[in-house]
Amino acid sequence: MANKSLLILISCATLNALTINDWGDIKVGIYEDFNGHFTYDGSDANKDKYILTDNITFISPEATLNIHFTLQNGAEWANKCGLIFCADGKSFTFNPGNIVFDLDSQVQTQPALGVFDLKSKAALEITSNLTITATPASNFDSIFKIDASNLTLDNANLFIDLSQNQNKTLFHTSGASKISINQGGDSASKTIQLTGDITIGGNTEFKLSLSNPRSFYKGIITLNDASTLSFEARNSFAQLDLNQTNPTKESTLLFDSSLLDGKITKKTIARSDLNLINQSAWLMRASSHIRNLHIKQSVIDFTQDSNGSRLQSPYKKKTLEAQTLTGNGDFNLYADVAQKQTDMINLQSANGTHKVHFLYNPATFTQDIIRNITEQDNLIVASIQEADSKAVFEGVKTQIGLLDYETILKKNATGATTDWIIAGIKESGESTLASALLTALNTHARLNTIFAQTLNLRLGDLRNYHKDNGLYFRYNIGQNALQKTTSLLPTQDFFMTFSAGYDFNVVTKPSYNFWGGGLDFVMLQTRNGIYQGDFQSFSGNAYFTSIFANRFYYDLLLRYAYNQGDLHFNGANLNGTSSTSSHTLLASAEIGYKIKLHNDLDFFFLEPQIKLNAGVTFVPTFTTKDTHDEIITAPYHFGFPLFGRSGLNFGYEWNSSFRGDVKAGTYLTYNLKNGFATTLKDTRSQLTKEFSSDFDVGLSLASNLFLEEYLRFYLEFDASFLAIYRNDYLFNAGIRWSFGERYVPPPPPSADPNRLKVHYKYKPNVRNIPIIRDDEVENMYHHQQNIDRIRNQRTFKQSSQGGASGNNQPNGDLRIDTPPKDRSTSRDSYIPSSKENNR
């Protein structure tokens, strides 16, 4: 039970830092976090318990000692040793752990005291991570005051910031002292961040190393007497002013892939050597003096002063003096051709080949002035105090606005001196600034090629639709590469496209016809070493597509797009953000034919395609400024994109177990112009640039899958490798959903194969039965009367003659032998029509 209670107490203690009242509360070492607030003054009889005169021992290297010191009654501190730590002739160590000290000594009136005081051959070795801060009004001589003693800090991080303090001294040394900071152990991983001044005197050896990008030094270092400095910066940064007050020994500064920002000055003689290697740079804020200068693949820049760019101030000549110059490097000098003044390098001896870049004052740089610059103006760039020196200084191109200017340097050896002078300045083509702006504005033309996509990439496979309506959504992602040309910079374009649309289709013999429209949103990020552009494109399109039963198709599309982008410049004398926009109307036509290689339900096929795009693009006026506040404009201009694509795919189509296809092929593209004619203007010059044609070869892999009758999925991957503007990769994925019941008219009746033959059909004789009409009834009545009358007449006559003849025939036997003479006129001779028909 007791053991369990002890474990609980230990666990609770480790959750919160322990509070200490003085150094005596730490008995056996620091095993967990400790906090303390020490308040004391010089008259306190027990002040020694607040001033450390012992080791700091960490039992746990993860523990932190955090103490705030408040000093009072500063007048009582005369001739004392240290405000926080005192090592008077003794040796101490701070082992691995974490120390944070915060000092408030604003009432201290004895600034001769150091916060850490080492004297009389004392020694302090620190392997703890150490952080020291002080209130702005705190008064002290320095953080570390070291007299004839040694301080070593290795395998530890060091953070001291006095940027806001009235006293900014970090180290103040005298006597035969040795200070070594980050010289051994795992120095490359340790962070050293020092902000404040260093005063090195006596016979002190001071060594400081910064070994990673997190490390820096900001301050003033003063060298006195026989002191020496070894300052190394590797992949780091130093904002350093080195004052060589009166040193009698040599010091060394090494910058390896690092930046030196400041100046190196002397009072009587320069005894410091400077080595700049591996892409290092020195922003020389003022005229400087060094002993030996070695420069290798690095640059010394004269164009900045303490206030920034020298262009904002009246011209004042700046010089760099050195006894020797070795290696090969670049020098950026500032010149004013109107005043016929230039910065200068003064050397006792020199060798190697060095390039000189000139920044000319743009306010006074005119075509008329530079035409009159000759070697008689005696503009000396480098002066070497030796006869016929073998060192070479070469003038290189200087960018002034839209054009580059080449400065011609000439060697002039007279007596014991060799001078390199400016012999002339001449135009040398368009500048990097102009190329950057042309490349940025060319983005509007490059956007058109992203829009020029094939039918399969846009809509997938449209064959055998069973619904009237269709919706599609697709997404593609890709990267295009613009190769370097005489006017365009190498640039990477990364883009994403989101597209959606609707269409309806009508079945007409012999094709499916699709009418539809869609919306596209493109995000494009274009970047190179000078700018990054963020573009957006909003477009709408309408299309008509017809697919025939034999797999021939054609596709017509009309698109309008509004493009806008922001350009973020960070080089080539361009800085800040500028905006640009454009409007595009683009029409395209595509035809293709899927050729079956055999008559099976599943079959191999070849598919040739050809596509043509044409349109117009309007780019409004573009305006920007360079770093010298000079306005550069590109007036509004039109472009007429015209480019085509032809391809041949080989693939396989399934129609039995499932439906879909897969195909691979190659394609050729031809762009009549890979950009629009663009004009740039500044106050000195005007530049108009035309663009050439472009040809590309690429590979394509695509697939269409019918998931359901109403759901289709399609994929495509493209890449090209030959053009100035080529497609590194393009991945496209889309899905189509169809809906709506299609009305299918009933099929027509089957045709009779004998419908065109002549048929002969037997017609039997039909008896013609007379039809009795009303008038015929009347005629028949009169006819009977006539018969009766005639009969009666003949009967009467025979009766009359019968007596004479003797009655040869019986009564009633009457024969009519003679018909009427005229039937046509005699009513009594009428014969019914039925009898006429039977004659």
Image: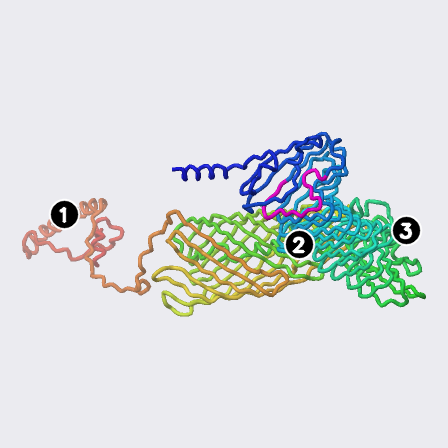
Q: CA distance from mark 2 to mark 3?
A: 44 Å
Mark 1 Cα within 10 Å, few/some/many (few <14, many 20+)? few
Mark 2 Cα within 10 Å, few/some/many (few <14, many 20+)? many
Quadrant housing residue 183: bottom right
Q: Which residue is mark 3?
A: 339
Does the stretch in magenta take in 635?
A: no
Q: Earlier in the sequence, mark 2 or mark 1?
A: 2
Judging from the image, what secondary structure is the residue with disc 1 in? Answer: helix
Which portion, as a residue range, is magenta? 81-100
Residue nearest the viewer, comparing 65 with 314? 65
Q: Quadrant of the N terminus?
A: top left
Mark 3 Cα within 10 Å, few/some/many (few <14, many 20+)? few
Front of the two marks 2 and 1: 2
Q: Earlier in the sequence, mark 1 or mark 3?
A: 3
Q: Residue 303 appears at what percent x and percent y?
A: 80, 51
Residue nearest the viewer, comparing 830 with 128? 128
Judging from the image, what secondary structure is the residue with disc 3 in? Answer: loop
Residue nearest the viewer, comparing 457 with 816? 457
Q: Which residue is mark 2?
A: 211
Does the stretch in magenta take in 86?
A: yes
Residue at screen point 41% across, 63% down: 653
Residue at screen point 24% across, 53% down: 823
Q: CA distance from mark 1 to mark 3?
A: 161 Å
Q: Which residue is mark 1?
A: 788
Q: Is residue 696 left or right of residue 204?
A: left
Judging from the image, what secondary structure is the residue with disc 2 in? Answer: loop
Q: Residue 281 appears at what percent x and percent y?
A: 74, 55
**In the displayed image of the protein, which residue is found farthest to the bottom?**
598
Q: Quadrant of the C terminus?
A: bottom left
